[in-house]
Image (spheres, rainbow, N blue to C red):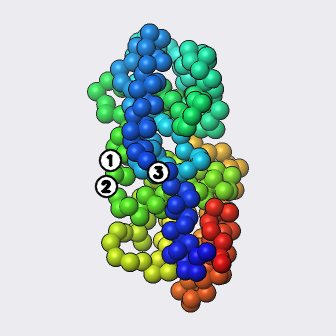
């Protein structure tokens, strides 16, 4: 029964955070994927990445992400992104593999126990330090170097990673328009978050307001982040960002003036029922 905003956030973090050794969980799934692919594909590397590795996973939502670097000449050359994804899905069909992700980049394997796996096929580009991964929605290949992003997140503060989980919870509660990777990119740029010292009741609402303002700035129509999304989705998402900014601003103002009930009520609108109710 939280009677301070900070107590509410503490309960919120306990609700949305996955316990245990997440890196070990991710690596175990990576090893299982390597085992399943043995004899079916020539792989140059199998890499555990994503929110479990980065410590930004959201309970009840996040799965394991595994990049499989395929031999280009044997499995990629002369094929489009969709054909490569379909080849992986077909090879793993007996393991309940499906192409269900909206971003068109992964084959999802459903296990009997958590976590499922989003398997992303990739190929190396000669002389470059990045990988190409498929975008079946646009029929193109996307350059990526997830290990650079993993290293960046590891260097951020604990509260930055908490902010990333909150951003994912907000996104999930409001139709999931933005990819988790992009949410992390935005949250990493927020300056109103740091470790050390006790935070006041208005500190997290202030940080959330900064997140939404940063997100609005970084998602202008000409931005890099705007590329993978449809015009309709992008317009709706921008509206929801502005609504998030308003709600977090109202929560900050209420918390700053000692009105805990109003602050908590605004935050429950922002995050949904996973944020603890007042009283």
Q: Nearer the viewer, mark 1 or mark 3?
A: 3
User: Quarter holding the N terminus?
Assistant: bottom right
Q: Which residue is mark 3?
A: 19
In three-dimensional space, the C-alpha distance between marks 1 and 3, rounded to whole angstroms, equals 21 Å
Residue 27 locus on image (x, y percent): 39, 34
Q: Is residue 176 at all visible to an observer of this figure? A: yes
Query: SS of the residue at dot 3?
Result: loop
- The local crowd at label 1, few if under 14, some if 14 to 19, many if 20 or more residues have their Cα within 10 Å, is few
Q: Nearer the viewer, mark 2 or mark 3?
A: 3
User: Quarter holding the C terminus?
Assistant: bottom right
Q: Is residue 80 above or below residue 216?
A: above
Q: Nearer the viewer, residue 156 or 55?
A: 55
Identify the residue at image location x=31%, y=31%. 128
Q: Which residue is mark 1?
A: 151
Q: Is residue 135 at all visible to an observer of this figure? A: no
Residue 130 locus on image (x, y percent): 36, 34
Residue 139 locus on image (x, y percent): 58, 28
Residue 89 locus on image (x, y percent): 58, 20
Is the Cβ of the residue at disc 2 closer than 8 Å to that at disc 1? yes
When asked about the image quadrant of residue 12, the answer is: bottom right
When asked about the image quadrant of residue 276, the answer is: bottom right
Q: Which residue is mark 2?
A: 155
């Amino acid at each position: 029964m939280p009677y301070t905003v900070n107590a509410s956030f503490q309960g919120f973090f306990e609700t949305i955070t996955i316990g245990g050794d997440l890196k070990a969980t991710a690596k175990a799934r990576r090893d299982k994927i390597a085992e399943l692919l043995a004899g079916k594909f020539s792989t140059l590397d199998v890499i555990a990445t994503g929110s479990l590795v980065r410590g930004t996973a959201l309970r009840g939502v996040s799965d394991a992400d595994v990049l499989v670097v395929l031999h280009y000449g044997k499995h990629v050359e002369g094929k489009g992104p969709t054909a490569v994804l379909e080849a992986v899905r077909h090879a793993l069909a007996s393991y309940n593999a499906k192409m269900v992700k909206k971003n068109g980049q992964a084959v999802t394997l459903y296990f009997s126990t958590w976590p499922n796996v989003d398997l992303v096929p990739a190929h190396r580009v000669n002389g470059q330090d990045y990988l190409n991964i498929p975008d079946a929605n646009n029929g193109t290949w996307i350059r990526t170097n997830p290990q650079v992003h993993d290293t960046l997140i590891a260097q951020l503060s604990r509260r930055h990673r908490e902010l990333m989980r909150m951003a994912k919870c907000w996104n999930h509660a409001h139709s999931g328009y933005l990819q988790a990777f992009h949410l992390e990119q935005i949250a990493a740029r927020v300056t109103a978050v740091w470790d050390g010292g006790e935070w006041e009741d208005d500190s997290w609402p202030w940080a959330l307001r900064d997140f939404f303002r940063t997100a609005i700035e970084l998602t202008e129509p000409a931005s890099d982040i705007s590329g993978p999304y449809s015009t309709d989705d992008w317009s709706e998402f921008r509206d929801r960002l502005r609504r998030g900014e308003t709600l977090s601003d109202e929560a900050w103002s209420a918390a700053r003036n000692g009105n805990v009930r109003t602050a908590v009520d605004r935050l429950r609108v922002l995050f949904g029922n996973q944020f603890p109710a007042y009283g």
